[in-house]
Amino acid sequence: MSQILTLVAPAGGLAAPDLARLRSALEALGALPGTPDWLSPGEAADLPFTGLAADQAMAVARRALAGAPVDLYAQPAEGRRKSLLLADMDSTIVTSETLDELAAYAGLKERIAEITRRSMNGELDFRQALVERVGMLAGLPTEALERTWAETQVTAGAAALVATMRANGAHCAIVSGGFTFFTGRVADKLGFHAHYSNTLLVADGKLTGKVGEPILDRDAKLATLKRLAAELALPLSATLTVGDGANDLAMIQAAGLGVAFRAKPVVAAAARARVDHTDLRALLFFQGYRAAEILPG
């Protein structure tokens, strides 16, 4: 079966000698690499190959590139473009952890951020960690939500990812252990079809310190992926998921293309596809989109 190894680097960071070195390394193991196809000159290229398993090709590429800031992924050439995008929000579609930023207005950012870090690395039960952190914010005026939203930044490439996949017929949704106050605004801003997340309970203009039930956790993210795929009559192989935390891992591993984006160590170690050096446009290059096809968002 023909396969494709895609390499993506910061603009101008990928050169012909890199591809030549990689072709030589693949040939040394008995693979038959084809002619490189530049998706974006100096930034992204496809290298077709046969005669080697995808995981072996990625291992060879990482050794050949010797730690260069290049993200890469190998997969069958057929079926690369996905019809469902399901994305985490915090530290994925937006650059921050919105709950941590919200906690700053209660003077608790460092304390809550440490719990977040441990939860996202799989050291704490997600549900318990969420309930604990929200409980610490009881009495915080809802004005803090608006102020946090005003400071929230979209991750580079997120708008292009959603706009391009949506224009090509994909269903795009956010699934987050965060909160509807933020996911709804992010979905509206970037053009996601839907968003699924948790609800912060409010009374008399202040947070109650409670989260609405049911709580959306790791299992719920995977369930959302399977439900949406079934509703759209898609096999999981036609889906793309992306996230950074331990609560994203199940959906990352279940998707046809599951990407750990600048992820926590436990997630990066377990995911086949990783983006460590570039932005979310890499997910489009992994699907074979050319620079000229990518919309600005």
Image: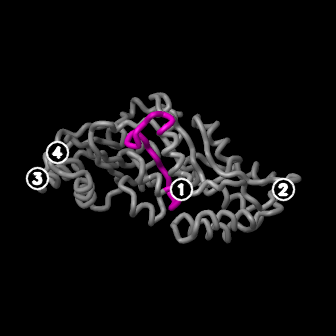
Query: Which numbered disc covers residue 206?
Result: 2
**Residue at the farthest right position:** 204
- Mark 4 or mark 3: whose residue is earlier in sequence: 3
Q: Position of residue 170 (x, y in %)?
A: 47, 33
Q: Nearer the viewer, mark 4 or mark 1?
A: 1
**Location of the N terminus (image quadrant):** top left
Q: Is residue 156 visible?
A: no
Q: Is residue 221 visible?
A: yes
Disc 2 secondary structure class = strand
Which residue in the structure is indicated by mark 4? 50
Query: Which numbered disc covers residue 10?
Result: none
Task: Reply above or below: 117 against 34.
Answer: below
Q: CA distance from mark 2 to mark 3?
A: 65 Å
Is 43 or 86 nearer to us in this picture? Answer: 86
- Mark 1 or mark 2: whose residue is earlier in sequence: 2
Q: Residue at x 27, y 61 (%)?
A: 66
Q: Residue at x 17, y 49 (%)?
A: 23
Which residue in the structure is indicated by mark 1? 219
Neighbour tally class for label 2: few under 14, some 14-19, many 20 plus, Cα within 10 Å: some
Q: Position of residue 28 (x, y in %)?
A: 11, 55
Residue 274 relative to residue 157: left or right: left
Name the amino acid, label 1: Asp
Do callouts 2 and 3 mark residues in contact (Cβ within 8 Å)? no
Magenta residues, start to end:
230-248
- Mark 4 or mark 1: whose residue is earlier in sequence: 4
Q: Position of residue 220 (x, y in %)?
A: 56, 52
